[in-house]
Image (cartoon, coloured by chain):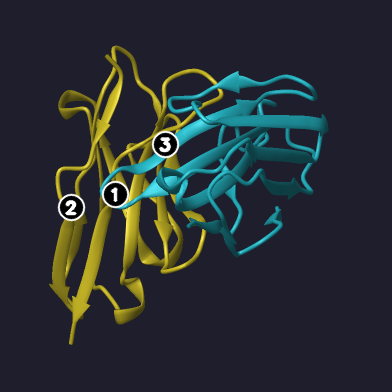
Chain colours: A yellow, B cyan
Amino acid sequence: AQSVTQPDIHITVSEGASLELRCNYSYGATPYLFWYVQSPGQGLQLLLKYFSGDTLVQGIKGFEAEFKRSQSSFNLRKPSVHWSDAAEYFCAVNFGNEKLTFGTGTRLTIIP
Amino acid sequence: DVKVTQSSRYLVKRTGEKVFLECVQDMDHENMFWYRQDPGLGLRLIYFSYDVKMKEKGDIPEGYSVSREKKERFSLILESASTNQTSMYLCASSSSRQGVALYEQYFGPGTRLTVT
């Protein structure tokens, strides 16, 4: 069955530390992959996406993600987090139709 | 910039009331979506529409209906609101045209609905 998993419900990191948020999917082919961010009380904003080509994609706000076909993963990274990065992050996958399937989200807390 | 707007940011309704949530997009997108978001459950698709007057059930359509009379507008209807429909409702739109940010969804700010 097609599915998206974000195994970390909540992550806490210190300001200035590096960040990696995990996303795994289950699918027989290469899907289209997205990361969205949701600030408190807001809608979702697209951070980056992968359709094909270079497996390391750059996004907004200094984020990047790497597609690893062998691991069916699309992990989000940032070398140095800022307090403004505190938010909820959603991985989303398009399995070849008009819809996106979302993971359950990872809430990121930044400590000074 | 794509803009998706929703009619209300906050809404309080009573059990049994009929509730309308409106969503408008200005990018001539073919596809429009309604999600509900609950803590720990992520976003769950209620209904979507890929063209005017077309609709498809999502994962949790029970208790909801939708209407799409114009391309830019997609309405979510709760025929008889219940307390278990208290949630955040998010509208999104996307294009199916190749080369036009294919399948990338653009979201509205959300409507937080409380049913008492």
Q: Earlier in the sequence, mark 1 or mark 2?
A: 2
State how far apart marks 1 and 2 are (Cα). 7 Å
Res. A77 in view: no
Question: What residue is rendered at 61% in x and 38% in y?
Answer: B101
Front in this rendered view, residue A54 or B38: B38
On-image quarter of the C terminus of chain A? bottom left
Q: Chain of mark 1?
A: A
Question: What residue is rendered at 68% in x and 35% in y?
Answer: B100
Q: Of helix, strand and loop, which one carries label 1?
A: loop
Q: Of helix, strand and loop, which one carries label 2?
A: loop
Residue A20: name its quadrant: bottom left
Question: What residue is rendered at 15% in x and 62% in y?
Answer: A11
State how far apart marks 3 and 2 are (Cα). 17 Å
Res. A102 in view: yes
Tell me: residue B27, above or below residue B3.
above
User: Which mark, residue A105?
Assistant: 1
Q: Residue B56, image x and y in percent? A: 60, 19
Q: Residue B77, image x and y in percent? A: 65, 38
State how far apart marks 3 and 1 are (Cα). 12 Å
Same chain under badges 1 and 2? The reply is yes
Q: Residues within 10 Å of mark 3 (few under 14, many from 20)?
A: many
User: Which mark, residue A75?
Assistant: none
Same chain under badges 3 and 2? The reply is no
What residue sits right under mark 2 in the picture? A9
Discs 3, 2 touching: Cβ within 8 Å: no
On-image quarter of the N terminus of chain A? top left
Question: What residue is rendered at 45% in x and 51% in y?
Answer: B86
Q: Of helix, strand and loop, which one carries label 3?
A: strand
The amino acid beneath tag 3 is Arg
Q: Chain of mark 3?
A: B
Discs 1, 2 touching: Cβ within 8 Å: yes
User: Which mark, residue B44?
Assistant: 3
